């Protein structure tokens, strides 16, 4: 039974996992679904064997078991390709801190159906928690990559956040917000995008 990564047809949380699986030489199906297919697949209970918590990404292994939680999937794939250490606890801690900080930046971004209210909340978030989080990432970034000379899963996740902002997909946050205020994070994103592994396996649109 082939390994299958299931996610939406966008970079998002699937991007770093795709890069790591590709870099590791894992043969897998990169399965793209839409939201309605997710709703149908998780069924009336909101979860199923195919979608254990009713969300994506999910990774089905050769054993037939499907696993969820993007952070767990990323660390699994990262270990296989050498972008997440197997025996350096201190380095793992630095990488995990960055990955979880980026995760919080996305999940804690305020939402509202009222666009005026959403704008107000997002601007407060930008000037408060988001500023604090970006500041921490910038302070920790050693260059050219987050932990130094080698790219890790932290770089892939930071790239994802920076790209989301730069492409205007982080509503009511200026597209140059990160690159203008924390130039070293902008340089990190350039370094990541230039990596052949990202170009070959990331599924990003060509410039």
Image: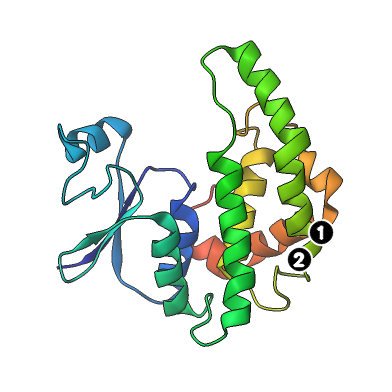
Q: From mark 1 to mark 2, how far is it between C-alphas?
A: 8 Å
Q: Residue sitting at 23 percent across and 35 percent down?
A: 37
**Residue 175 visible in image:** no
Q: Residue sitting at 19 percent across and 50 percent down?
A: 50
State yes or no: discs 1 and 2 in contact (Cβ < 8 Å): yes
Left or right: residue 57 versus residue 23 is: left
Dot 2, crowdedness within 10 Å: few (<14), some or many (≥20)?
some
Dot 1, crowdedness within 10 Å: few (<14), some or many (≥20)?
many
Left or right: residue 141 versus residue 192 is: right
Q: Which mark sits nearer the N-terminus, 1 or 2?
A: 2
Query: Residue 137 lies in what quarter of the image?
Result: bottom right
Colour setting:
rainbow
**Front-lying residue, 89 or 66:** 89
Element type where label 1 sits in the image: helix
Residue 201: numbered disc: none
Q: Residue sitting at 83 percent across and 51 percent down?
A: 182
**Front-lying residue, 96 or 207:** 96
The residue labelled by disc 1 is 184
Q: Which of label 1 and label 2 is nearer to you?
A: 2
Q: Position of residue 176 (x, y in %)?
A: 78, 39
Q: Position of residue 84 (x, y in %)?
A: 52, 75
Query: Residue 130 lies in what quarter of the image?
Result: top right
Query: Residue 76 lies in what quarter of the image?
Result: bottom left
Please say if 18 is above or below 34. below
Residue 141: numbered disc: 2
Element type where label 2 sits in the image: loop
**Front-lying residue, 161 or 30:** 161
Left or right: residue 85 versus residue 50 is: right
Q: Quadrant of the N terminus?
A: bottom left
Q: Position of residue 173 (x, y in %)?
A: 71, 31
């Amino acid at each position: 039974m082939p390994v299958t990564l299931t996610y939406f047809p966008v970079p998002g949380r699937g991007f770093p996992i795709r890069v790591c699986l590709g870099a590791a030489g894992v043969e897998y199906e990169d399965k793209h679904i839409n939201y309605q297919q997710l709703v149908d697949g998780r069924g009336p209970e909101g979860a199923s064997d195919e979608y254990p918590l009713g969300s994506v990404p999910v990774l089905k292994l050769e054993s037939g078991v499907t696993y969820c939680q993007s952070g767990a999937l990323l660390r699994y794939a990262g270990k296989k390709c050498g972008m997440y250490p197997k025996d350096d606890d201190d380095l793992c801690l630095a990488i995990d801190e960055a990955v979880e900080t980026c995760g919080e930046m996305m999940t804690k971004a305020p939402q509202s159906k009222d666009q005026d209210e959403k704008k107000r909340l997002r601007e407060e978030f930008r000037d408060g928690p988001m500023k604090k989080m970006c500041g921490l990432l910038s302070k920790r970034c050693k260059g050219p990559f987050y932990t130094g000379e080698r790219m890790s899963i932290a770089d892939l996740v930071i790239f994802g956040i920076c790209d989301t902002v730069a492409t205007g997909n982080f509503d009511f946050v200026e597209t140059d917000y990160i690159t203008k205020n924390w130039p070293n994070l902008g340089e990190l994103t350039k370094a990541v995008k230039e990596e052949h592994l990202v170009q070959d396996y990331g599924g990003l649109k060509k410039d």
